[in-house]
Amino acid sequence: MESNALQSGTLLQGKSYTYTIQKALGQGSFGITYLAMTQVKVTGALGELETTMQVAIKEFFMKEINGREDNTVTSGSKGGIYDKYKQNFAREAKNLSKLHHPHIIKVLEYFETNNTVYYAMEYVEGGSLDEYIAQKSGLPEAECVKYTKQIGAALSYMHTHKMLHLDLKPGNVMLRKNGDAVLIDFGLSKQYDENGEPESSITVGGGTPGYAPLEQSDYQEGKEFPVTMDVYALGATMFKMLVGNRPPKASDILNNGFPAYELQKLHVSNALISCIAYAMAPMKKDRPQSVEIFLTNLEGEETSLTIDEDKNVTKPDKETTHPAQPDFNATPNQGSSKNKKYILSGIAAILIIAGTIVYGISQPNANTEQANNNILTEDSVAIINPPAAVNQSQVPPKDTLNENSEGIINPVKSSVKNATVSSIAENKKIKVIEKKLTPQQMYNKGREHYKNRNYEEAVKWYRKAAEQGYALAQYYLGSCYEEGQGVAQDDVEAVKWYRMAAEQGHVDSQSSLGSSYIIKDYQEAFKWYRMAAEQRHADSQFMIGFMYENGWGVTENYKEATKWYQKAAEQGYVFAQYSLACMYDYGKGVAENKQEAIIWYRKAAEQKHSKAKERLQELGVK
């Protein structure tokens, strides 16, 4: 399989067993996994017998650094880097070998040979939970709850032993033949001592976008054992099980709220949606503070559906578009100098207390092409996409080009003098026609295919236009990579195309880059949000205000925060209106001014912001 993998038939001598390599199962950046055979002794009615057992063996091997001479791993001039990471891998193996739980992969032993580290573990044949979800296009509610309880039990056991997983996702959960879930891949795991202090100086890994909370990207070790990061990932894993798609990035939930509608349209019970939203609260203090608490809530809210009953629920088309603005339901706290709560923290509490979901949203689209015509009720959230500044040079004309537009030849409708024209000649003709299309016309074709949900064709045309420097096409190509539409999901490619468009001044690409970086590099996120904010992009103006207020990627500055909240609020951006009201209400960055606060609370309340309504009532304003 891999050129650097051990050959079939290679023998590895462990501490207790001898292993024969059968084949390589896969290779990542830091290791190669093999299928191997070993002899083990079992005791039964006939006494002690020796039997052959299949095992999986993980070998530490850094793809970009290591080579191999015979079976020995080499590292050349980068031996120092290799040794450091090898120690981390050995620590992972040691910690794993201490865990004994029915829903955690069983490690037989770990050992060193060939100038590297190995650990042997049970081989699970059933495939991953991620593959199972893909086969089923999402799981029924009762089955999701079943797997969540099993995974949760494994996490709870790990936490009892002062160990975090930090990379929980369906791809890191295997299913045994009997259907039980098994937690695997502890490459980002971290061990803590009894006092909550990390046992090593290894930085907490950033995790996987969609499953990692915001704080994991820039986590600062303190005197705490941050189990809420695994709680977030467990909620995100539930989301993936039910919807069938990767959950939104934590930064998207921060900006746009929890996408409850993605679950509601699949008829998931409100009680279960509440539990998931609670676990995926953007701020760690607003989540369940342990897996045990989360599982208790899940037990209390669990529906009576059986797996068989739930299988017949009809799932609407996943690509249906819906309004895209949520409500940051939060309560201000006068005493906190780093008070993020009034923007974000009420999401989970409101969901649990109210027993219903007030968010009727789907994934946001900064270049939304659909007007918001939805009728709002007292229990719904105002859905208003903030106006994005537009780079006029990249906007297609109103008369969108089509196949009959002047100057465009339709190869199908063209008259053919010779009915026996070969397919090769026809293909050449099509290529000539494509060369005559302008980048804007290529982009228009991409949009047409995208609207018809022919995503692979859309990507093809977007790419043609993008490669000629057309910013709108670069933006939409980046979006397709980010969402995995018409192409394999790839955050690196998404950032690449967003950056190309952003460097041309495309405002939505600048904002998208900010969202991409906010889970891993606050300063880079701030830079791109700032560029978009200066083009009057309301969402980015709000984020700049939020980052100034909370000191994310920039020195904390309430005065600057208020300035940017004001800019977004004046564009009708509801979150900024509420945040600005809070600044005036509590005198943060401006002199305390209840009357000015009331003005902005009212504006937010008119857009159905529930916390703005509550605060007006507290102030005695009708």
Image (tube, rainbow, N blue to C red):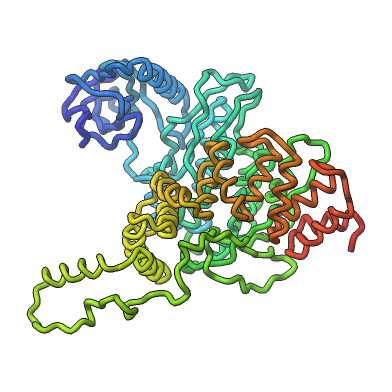
Q: Disc count in the image?
A: 0
Which is nearer the eye, 21 or 498? Answer: 498
Which is nearer the eye, 81 or 175? Answer: 81
Q: Is residue 265 above or below residue 576?
A: below
Res 4 seen here: yes
What is the quadrant of the C terminus in the image? Answer: bottom right
Where residue 384 sits in the image (x, y, percent)? 64, 64
Image point 43% across, 30% down: which residue? 187
Q: Is residue 451 above or below residue 558?
A: below
Instruction: Determine which quarter of the picture holds residue 224.
Output: top right
Image point 39% across, 69% down: which residue? 444
Image point 40% across, 20% down: which residue? 90
Which is nearer the eye, 549 or 272? Answer: 549
Where residue 186 sits in the image (x, y, percent)? 44, 31
Image point 32% across, 22% down: which residue? 118
Q: Is residue 317 above or below residue 613?
A: below
408 left or right, relative to 147 = left
What is the quadrant of the N terminus in the image? Answer: top left
166 left or right, relative to 538 = left
Residue farthest to the right, as pictured: 620
Where residue 362 sits in the image (x, y, percent)? 56, 61
Res 143 seen here: no
Instruction: Determine which quarter of the picture holds residue 223.
Output: top right
